[in-house]
């Protein structure tokens, strides 16, 4: 591919990311038809790399997807990973924590969903909800039963949360899990149009929730929360990529290239076959060919 989306959308550590400076409708020099053609080519490349990851068995890949509602997370997963062997890839969609999950620390349930070596894990929403939705609505943290009043959620509290996330991701990186974190950056105007489409088109009604409109009222608070989270947690071992998402066809082809680049960095290898095993293969071949 003649494009370098990994460099274009990488938020480097300590780079002072400002969300307002990132164009949500950017699509570079690529057009829709070319993007669709490239996506199909890249999907085959991803399929082969996932097979190699599984055969190698020494590492795993964790993809974290975060975005505002209607930014295209679900459709990106469908279009990017549609050709991958489902045995080697698992998607986990995190909703509000259950009573059991609230009885543990905020990262506990995410440990349970991590990909095993040789596999790809996709978090559709993630441990970042604790510094996003819970920062916009700090009262949610009271369900953890450690704190008794929202006034306790001060600057030190949030710094501790960011530190916990950094430590969690560094531990994973040190133990064979590569991490790609993608923020699909959609505009407020485009979100409005997608909500209206869900209301106006009968086959999309099921996607719409009136709660989405309520959350839309906190748009600026969410942008501040995303900006802080990305600045605090984009690291060399767990980088954030901010992808323009007003054009779904563009965000898909950008995301798949970033994911492929990360897999290629792993230097994956198929297992080697010993001389003894090769001899056994030849014996088996002869037996099968002579079978009557």
Image (cartoon, grey):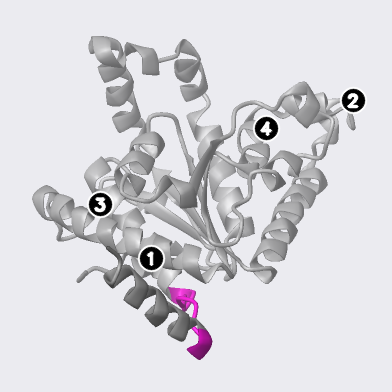
Disc 3 and disc 4: Cα gap in Å?
30 Å
Kind of element beneath mark 3: loop
Which SS does the magenta portion mostly show?
loop
Residues in magenta, as a range? 265-276
Q: Is residue 163 left or right of residue 22?
A: right
Q: Find disc 3 in the rendering and name its residue.
A: 26
Q: Nearer the viewer's eye, disc 2 or disc 1? A: 1
Disc 3 and disc 1: Cα gap in Å?
28 Å
238 up-or-down from 249: above or below: below
Kind of element beneath mark 1: helix
Residue at x 46% of width, y 80% of height: 280
For marks 3 and 2 on the same chain, the one whose residue lies earlier in the sequence: 3
178 up-or-down from 24: above or below: below
Kind of element beneath mark 2: loop
Disc 4 and disc 2: Cα gap in Å?
15 Å
Q: Find disc 2 in the rendering and name its residue.
A: 148
Q: Find disc 1 in the rendering and name its residue.
A: 49
Q: Would you identify the image quadrant in which residue 213 lies?
A: top left
Disc 1 and disc 4: Cα gap in Å?
36 Å
The reply to whether residue 247 is in sight is no
Asked whether 202 or 290 is in front, the reply is 290
Disc 2 and disc 1: Cα gap in Å?
48 Å
């Amino acid at each position: 591919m003649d494009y370098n989306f990994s460099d274009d959308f990488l938020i480097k550590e300590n780079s002072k990311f400002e969300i307002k400076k990132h164009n949500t409708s950017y699509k570079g020099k690529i057009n829709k038809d070319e993007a669709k053609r490239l996506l199909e080519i890249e999907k085959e490349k991803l399929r082969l790399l996932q097979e190699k990851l599984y055969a190698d068995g020494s590492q795993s890949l964790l993809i974290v997807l975060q975005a505002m509602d209607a930014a295209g997370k679900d459709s990106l997963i469908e279009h990017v990973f549609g050709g991958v062997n489902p045995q080697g890839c698992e998607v986990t969609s995190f909703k509000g924590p259950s009573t059991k999950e609230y009885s543990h620390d905020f990262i506990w349930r995410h440990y349970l969903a991590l990909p095993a070596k040789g596999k790809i894990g996709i978090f559709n929403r993630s441990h970042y909800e604790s510094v996003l939705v819970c920062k916009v609505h700090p009262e949610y943290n009271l369900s953890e039963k450690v704190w008794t009043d929202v006034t306790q959620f001060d600057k030190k509290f949030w710094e501790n949360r960011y530190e916990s996330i950094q430590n969690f991701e560094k531990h994973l990186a040190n133990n064979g899990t590569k991490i790609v974190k993608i923020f699909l950056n959609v505009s407020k105007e485009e979100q409005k149009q997608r909500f209206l489409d869900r209301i106006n088109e009968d086959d999309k009604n099921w996607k719409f929730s009136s709660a989405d409109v309520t959350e839309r009222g906190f748009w600026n608070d969410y942008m501040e929360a995303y900006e802080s989270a990305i600045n605090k947690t984009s690291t060399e071992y767990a980088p954030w990529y901010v992808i323009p998402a007003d054009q779904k066809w563009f965000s898909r082809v950008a995301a798949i290239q970033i994911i492929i680049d990360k897999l290629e960095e792993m230097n994956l290898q198929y297992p080697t076959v010993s001389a003894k095993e090769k001899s056994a293969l030849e014996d088996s071949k002869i037996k099968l060919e002579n079978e009557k």
